[in-house]
Image: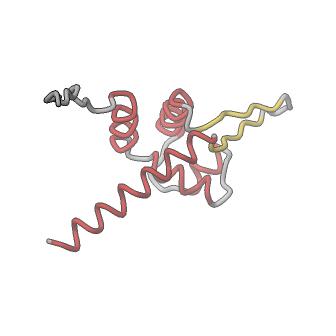
Amino acid sequence: MKNREKKYLRKTAPTESAKIVETIYGCKWSLTVYQLLADGINRPGEMVRSIEGLTTKVLNQCLRKNTEFGILERISYNEVPPRVEYKVTDFGTKFMKVLDELEKLQHEIENKI
């Protein structure tokens, strides 16, 4: 019998998904926006009115970043006045499940302390 040695390649952290998680958690409003979308509030003006302290400029930056990551989809209607809505993509649904699991892990950590 030959003595075979197993060779393992060095495992590295997922760079893109880690970057997305870091950016979303770094954004003060992203998690709140997800909560609003889950409650059926999907228009930017209504979002700003629903959250004290949130400005239109900051909300637009938050929505743009989430759209770039593919978490949210921007739907623009050809109407006068213009109407824009946001919805969670299939990828966004998967991503939010990851965030939910991280939140559960955080609760477990807090309960051990």
Percent x, y of residue 85: 70, 40
How many labels were placed on the picture?
Answer: 0
Residue farthest to the front?
1
Quadrant the C terminus occupies: bottom left
Quadrant of residue 109 in the image? Answer: bottom left
Percent x, y of residue 63: 54, 36
User: Colour scheme of this structure image?
Assistant: secondary structure
Residue 23, placed above or below residue 38: above
Q: Residue at x 50, y 30 (%)?
A: 69
Quadrant of residue 10 in the image? Answer: top left
User: Foreground: 53 or 113?
Assistant: 113
Residue 69, placed above or below residue 110: above
User: Foreground: 82 or 1?
Assistant: 1
Q: Residue at x 84, y 28 (%)?
A: 78
Quadrant the N terminus occupies: top left
Percent x, y of residue 57: 50, 34
Quadrant of residue 22 in the image? Answer: top left
Q: Residue at x 51, y 39 (%)?
A: 59
User: Foreground: 14 or 6?
Assistant: 6
Residue farthest to the right?
79
Left or right of residue 112, residue 26 in this image: right
Left or right of residue 85, residue 78 in this image: right
User: Foreground: 25 or 76?
Assistant: 25
Percent x, y of residue 32: 48, 53
Left or right of residue 65, residue 85 in this image: right
Q: Residue at x 61, y 57 (%)?
A: 38
